[in-house]
Amino acid sequence: MSYKTSRREFLKTAAAASAVTCMTPAAFGQEANAVAPSNQITLGCIGVGGHGTGWNLDAFLKIPEARVLAVCDVYRDRCENARDMVNEAYGSSDCGTHGDFREVLARPDIDAVVISTPDHWHVLMSVMAARAGKHVFCEKPTLTVEEGQVLIDVIKQTGVVYQGGIEDRSVEIYHRMAELVRNGCIGKLNRILVVLPEGEVFPKEEEAPVPEGFDYDLWLGPAPYTPYTPTKTGQQEWRNVFDYSGGKLTDWGAHLMDTAQVAMFQEHGGPISVDGNGTFPEGAMSNTATEYKIYYEYPGGVEMIVKSGGSGIRFEGTDGWVESPSWRKPMRASDPAILDAVIEPAENKMWPLPPTEHQSFIDGVKGRTTPYYTPTDIHRLSTAMHVGNISMRLGRKLTWDPESETFPGDDEANPFLSRPMREPWSLKETV
């Protein structure tokens, strides 16, 4: 499939193609440790920028039970680079390229999609893929609380397998920390400190012509229309703009705050109050918080403080503390005996260390089992981050009800739980 083939031309042939068995090169079944094509999960990778290739595509190419058949990006050069990466890995030349993700969803030879786009596309692409019968591996986080609710409903209705793209639950350091806390090795948990990087400030730019080979309108998709500027779509720039993301809180928070919620048995729960203060840039392209400090209260009286200035996590209990001072650094504890604690399997309140998120997804699709990061997990984690952003934007403490998923009686805060999508995009129907 050529990148230049139009969506209309592709969709005209999709129905006819559905009757044709997808063939792969003879060498496909001759590779070392090869898995028969009939036992492989075929993938279409949507969004093949830095993270989409360097983390997700690279990982799936190393899994024998997976076969990447197509790559898709609104940047032609990224798409062609990913195609070359796939063909080199397989020693073939049959990887399809697409500029419109809907072409990938229309392909009958694709079992599942891997979504590595900016945040404002995550849920919409996921629900469209699920409605097209594709299993979904999607990067974190959601963009709004309402989006997470829709994601849960659609995945349940369609019955496809969904895996959130967060690796921390399969990283031994964070798994072990959560295990120690859940099993009472530091006594009763009282306080959690999560430290995340500071936000970045990118200056405003003048409108510029859209480069050749870049579909800017499709990059925007459901986000509000704003004129193209040269750096806005860069990998870090868009993360600091509320139209597309939630700043460092939803970027890095999706990692360490997940470990925090798992450790206090709140992976399917949430805070009951949030009080945040943040510094927001003025006169810049960036508009998410740069410096911030947020106080969360969880059921049982556990306090979680999330602040800017690093990448660590610390749990404090009545009998000691345990921490990882910065990203993936070895654990430390108030007493070395905490780190050496032996927890009998029959009494363990933590699940076993799972494989990587990529292997977990492929295993889930093959066995029609639930991977380790479900729509409910990603929704509840994202919700905690979203309410933190809402509190900072309003500049006051908020009461949150994790059962109704509302700010009770708060007519100023509740509208922030959703946001409109630019036409013709909608979560209610396939576009």
Image (cartoon, helix red, strand yellow):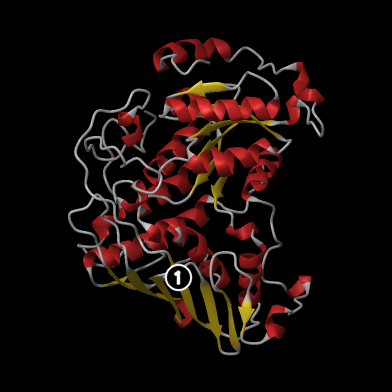
The quarter of the displayed image where residue 400 is located: bottom left
Left or right? Give the position of 146 relative to 27: left
Vertical order, 365 against 271 (above or below): above
Q: Position of residue 5 (x, y in %)?
A: 44, 14
Vertical order, 398 against 98 (above or below): below
Q: Position of residue 89 (x, y in %)?
A: 67, 30
Q: Secondary structure at mark 1?
A: strand
Residue at which label 1 appears: 195
Residue type highlighted by circle 1: Val
Q: Nearer the viewer, residue 54 or 45?
A: 54
The quarter of the displayed image where residue 340 is located: bottom right
Does residue 155 appear anywhere in the picture?
no
Does residue 86 appear anywhere in the picture?
yes
Residue drawn at 58 percent across, 26 percent down = 84
Q: Position of residue 405 (x, y in %)?
A: 37, 61
Q: Nearer the viewer, residue 110 or 309?
A: 309
Q: Position of residue 53 (x, y in %)?
A: 55, 38
Residue drawn at 33 percent across, 46 percent down = 244
Mark 1, Cα crowd under 10 Å, few <14 / some 14-19 / many 20+, is many
- Report the number of numbered marks: 1
Name the quadrant of the C terminus: top left
Left or right? Give the position of 359 relative to 429: right
Residue drawn at 62 percent across, 28 percent down = 86
Q: Nearer the viewer, residue 195 or 184?
A: 195
Residue drawn at 45 percent across, 68 percent down = 310
Left or right? Give the position of 44 relative to 290: right
